[in-house]
Image (cartoon, rainbow, N blue to C red):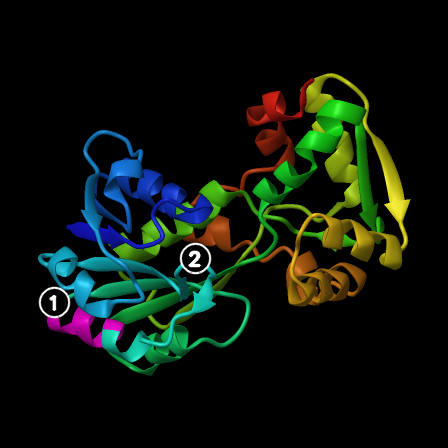
Amino acid sequence: MTILVTGATGTVGRQVVEQLLARGASVRALTRDPAKADFPEGVEVVRGDLTDPESLAPALDGVTGLHLITFGGEAFAPLECGPRLVELAAEAGVQRVTVLHGGGPTPLEDAVRAGGPAWTVLMPVEFMSNALEWAEGIRTEGVVREPFTGRLSAMVHESDIGAVAAAALTEDGHGGRTYVITGSEVLTLRDKVDALAAARGRGIVLVELSEEEARQQWQAAGLPQDTIDFLALVYGNTPPEGRTVTGVVEQVTGRPARTFAEWAAAHADAFRP
């Protein structure tokens, strides 16, 4: 079986590639710039752009499974060409499609759900890799500055998202399902900071910001206003889906979800001076 992975150079895309390789699948990675791609040996790298559906036609030749993201281009705008992408996949004989949910309804996800190959929608909660946003502050000052420090998160290891995707793309029984993918535990911000401190072997101070101070910090970091508003909303009132363990990783893969302590240990160097 040959699986085409779009968004292959992204945080989740790379994990989908890795997990598919572990299952013995033939992997074809789509990227706008193959010269800059860096994948393990055995991955076929092909050129294509999701904003130009016809560019995918050659890459879909012989493909049995397709992993899709819902945005494209430099601005990460939602793809408007979902129906054509689904049509091309069906014409190529693709049997299974996974879609990485983009945080809300999108034309691509709507098109996938409407028909064509068997689909599985992947809805991960907060990525553990988001903690890398704290790396500079921890390295230079030993400090994390965040609002709403009592907020809860069932954050998920990006490798587990890739593992669920790989299972859905290579096994029967996942068609028509929407998987909310979480880790195995619910963590406070203090829990996360403590795990990072243990991993790097040095303490970290957690400073709680007011919402206004946080907005100023995000604005200084160059975040657009809609992103700032979104962060304030989900951090201040995290929806149940973001703070409830689902068990999907274990149900789909047969093993427990990875912990944040495992993630922190693997990335400890990023947080050391």
Task: Please tell me whether residue 93 is drawn above or below residue 254 in the rendered image.
Answer: below
Determine which of the numbered discs, if any, sits on residue 92 in the image: 1
- When asked about the image quadrant of residue 227, the answer is bottom right
Q: Residue 142: percent from the left, percent from the top?
A: 80, 26
Magenta segment, which residues?
85-92
Q: Nearer the viewer, residue 143 or 238?
A: 143
Camera-side mark, 2 or 1 = 2
Q: Residue 60: percent from the left, percent from the top?
A: 15, 60
The residue sitting at 37% across, 76% down in the picture is: 80
Q: Residue 220: percent from the left, percent from the top?
A: 74, 49
In this rendering, would 245 be left or right of 213? left
Going from the N terminus, do you reach mark 2 or mark 1 first? 2
Mark 2 lies on residue: 74
Secondary structure beneath label 1: loop
Q: Confirm whether residue 253 shows in the render.
A: no
Q: Residue 87: percent from the left, percent from the top?
A: 20, 76
Task: Please tell me whether residue 54 is drawn above or below residue 12 in the rendered image.
Answer: below
Q: Amino acid under label 1?
A: Ala
Which residue ends up furthest to the bottom in the rendered image?
114
The residue sitting at 67% across, 32% down in the picture is: 135
Separation of disc 2 and disc 1 at Cα? 27 Å
Q: Confirm whether residue 14 shows in the render.
A: yes
- When asked about the image quadrant of residue 119, the answer is bottom left
